[in-house]
Image (cartoon, helix red, strand yellow):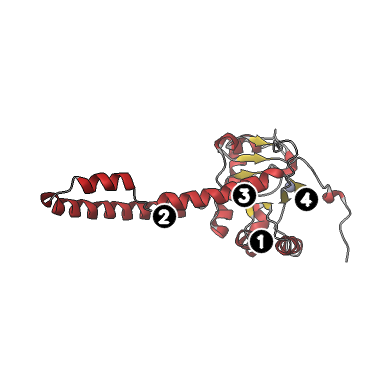
Amino acid sequence: MKKNELFLRPEGILIALLALCGVFSLAFMILPRPNPSKAKIRQSSINVKDVAANVGTQQQIEKLKAAMLTSWQQEAHKKGLSYAIPLRFQGAIVNAAKLTKGEKVIALTFDDGPWPQTTEQVLDILKSNNIKGTFFVVGQNLKNYPKLGKQIVSQGHVIANHTWHHWYHSFNPQAAAFEIDRTTDLIYQITGVKTNLFRPPGGNLHNGLAAYAKGQKYTVVMWSADSIDYKLPTYQS
Ligand SMILES: [Zn+2]
């Protein structure tokens, strides 16, 4: 069963922003930074005898830095880009954002795609209004329309897991793993993103999927407002 849902979910923007912060943090972490206080100490204690040794040590440090950087890059490539989810949301169900008084936040999430035409139209509308959203994709649809998955990510949106088949029945852990892992793997293969966001089809938290996702430290993302557009009759041209 397929349905198009337009959800208003405040956590999405927050998570997207945090993800962006995470990327920048990573960039800062891997950039070698001078430590002024240590540099000063080293400078003050230097003498002629130590020069050769220091040059050798410095070279070793540079080599080590290069090796670490390569290792970081390899690891990042292997793991894919993940969204930087705060620890308290990892393996947790998020139903709504807790807003401070007077705060007005809205986050858009789009489920069940990608679909030709409609996903493209949504992407165009978001682009022309400079809005970012979160797309919970169904694995088998992404397999059929990989270009749309690439477009979602390249246009700065968040891509997330909505199972492979969008089935509603109960799953044992192996079947749940198949539904979720296979979709995450495909998202990674196509976009380079290893998503850690999951939304169960129909919002069902009790059929084995959410339990598996939580065990794998996914953030299980629900919603606080529903456009119910999937109940409207299908447009016939
Ligand atoms: Zn759905």
Disc 3 on helix, strand or loop? helix
Disc 2 on helix, strand or loop? helix
| Mark 4 or 3, nearer chain start | 4
Horizontally, residue 172 falls left or right of residue 25, namely right
Disc 4 from disc 1: Cα separation:
22 Å
Residue 213 spot, x, y in % from top left: 60, 39
Q: Residues within 10 Å of mark 3 (few under 14, many from 20)?
A: many
The kind of residue tagged 1 is: Asn
| Mark 4 or 1, nearer chain start | 4
Residues under numbered marks 1 and 2 in contact, where contact means CB atoms less than 8 Å apart: no
Q: What residue does disc 4 label?
A: 6
Q: What residue does disc 2 label?
A: 73
Q: Is mark 3 within 8 Å of ligand 1?
A: no
Disc 4 from disc 3: Cα separation:
18 Å
The residue that appears at 63% across and 53% down in the rendered structure is 158
The residue that appears at 66% across and 55% down in the rendered structure is 140
Q: What residue does disc 3 label?
A: 16
Disc 2 from disc 3: Cα separation:
22 Å
Disc 1 from disc 2: Cα separation:
30 Å
